[in-house]
């Protein structure tokens, strides 16, 4: 796998959270979060279950409104919906396999906003399954299909929630390699939610670690590799309640 880039850039962030407080029903699950992703970089968002990773992702994409603070997308503070942000270049891959189970792989690709042929160029392994219904694909193949459709739309920002969850290591590697290529070749900005720090450090340029809704540690992937044992023991040592 290609190593994460170490290039410094002064480019403005594509997506940014500033002093973000957010949650559900007016109850904060994420507190005073500052986070950003620039073109051509992958940001890993790590934490145990219940740390606030998914809530953060939902706020970044416009599905959950800030209680205070702000989310800035493409340089502007706004409260656009996910659909509006998608039209401006944001793509979201959720933890669930976002495919139409009763349609074939080819039909799923045609329903995406991107070029179906480009999706097959990104993931050639899908070609042999084009006439197969998505519901008959393995979980890994369904996730490949989901990511292929997302990347084929040529997003400016990709938000991905737990891509590696429940998948074989070889599939995870294929997913991560495809994301890395798009980042390096097209300058996509990626926020990747992960529970597994070792998986995230394979691909990310920078890391944020959440604990009980607060950012407790951030730094480059290189810095985090040097503190891996400490990070796993101190910040990721076991789940707390349910994921939010």
Image: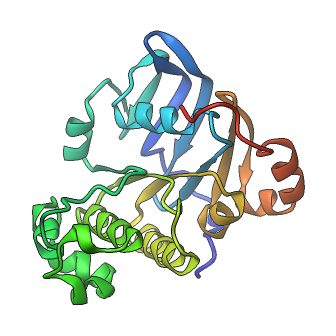
Res 141 quadrant in image:
bottom left
Q: At 54% from the left edge and 58% from the top edge, which residue is drawn?
A: 42
From the viewer's perspective, tell me whether residue 159 is left or right of residue 30.
left
The residue nearer to you, when weighing 92 against 106, is 106
Q: Is residue 85 above or below residue 139?
A: above
The residue nearer to you, when weighing 80 against 55, is 55
Query: Residue 134's x, y, as percent?
Result: 22, 69
Q: Is residue 53 above or below residue 79?
A: below
Query: Residue 169's x, y, as percent?
Result: 58, 76
Which quarter of the image is occupied by the N terminus? bottom right
From the viewer's perspective, tell me whether residue 57 is left or right of residue 131.
right
From the viewer's perspective, tell me whether residue 79 is left or right of residue 191.
left
Q: At 79% from the left edge and 57% from the top edge, which residue is drawn?
A: 224
Query: Residue 97's x, y, as percent?
Result: 34, 57
The residue nearer to you, when weighing 69 against 7, is 69
Q: How is the image coloured?
A: rainbow
From the viewer's perspective, tell me whether residue 27 is left or right of residue 138.
right
Res 100 quadrant in image:
bottom left
The residue nearer to you, when weighing 211 against 139, is 139
């Amino acid at each position: 796998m290609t190593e994460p880039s170490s290039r410094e850039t002064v480019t403005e962030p594509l997506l940014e959270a500033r002093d973000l407080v957010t949650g559900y029903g007016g109850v904060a699950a994420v507190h005073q979060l500052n986070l950003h992703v620039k073109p051509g970089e992958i940001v890993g968002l790590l934490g145990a279950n219940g740390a606030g990773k998914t809530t953060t992702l939902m706020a970044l994409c416009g599905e959950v409104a800030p209680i205070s603070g702000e989310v800035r997308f493409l340089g502007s503070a706004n409260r656009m919906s996910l659909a509006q942000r998608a039209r401006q270049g944001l793509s979201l891959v959720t933890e669930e396999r976002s495919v139409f189970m009763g349609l074939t792989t080819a039909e799923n690709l045609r329903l995406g906003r991107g070029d179906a042929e480009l999706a097959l160029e990104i993931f050639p392994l899908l070609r042999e399954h084009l006439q197969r219904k998505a519901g008959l694909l393995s979980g890994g193949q369904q996730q490949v299909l989901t990511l292929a459709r997302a990347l084929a739309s040529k997003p400016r920002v990709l938000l991905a929630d737990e891509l590696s969850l429940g998948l074989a290591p070889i599939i995870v590697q294929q997913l991560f390699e495809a994301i890395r290529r798009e980042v390096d070749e097209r300058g996509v900005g990626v926020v990747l939610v992960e529970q597994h720090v070792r998986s995230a450090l394979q691909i990310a340029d920078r890391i944020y670690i959440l604990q009980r809704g607060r950012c407790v540690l951030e730094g480059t992937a290189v810095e985090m590799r040097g503190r891996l044992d400490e990070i796993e023991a101190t910040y990721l040592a076991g789940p707390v309640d349910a994921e939010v």
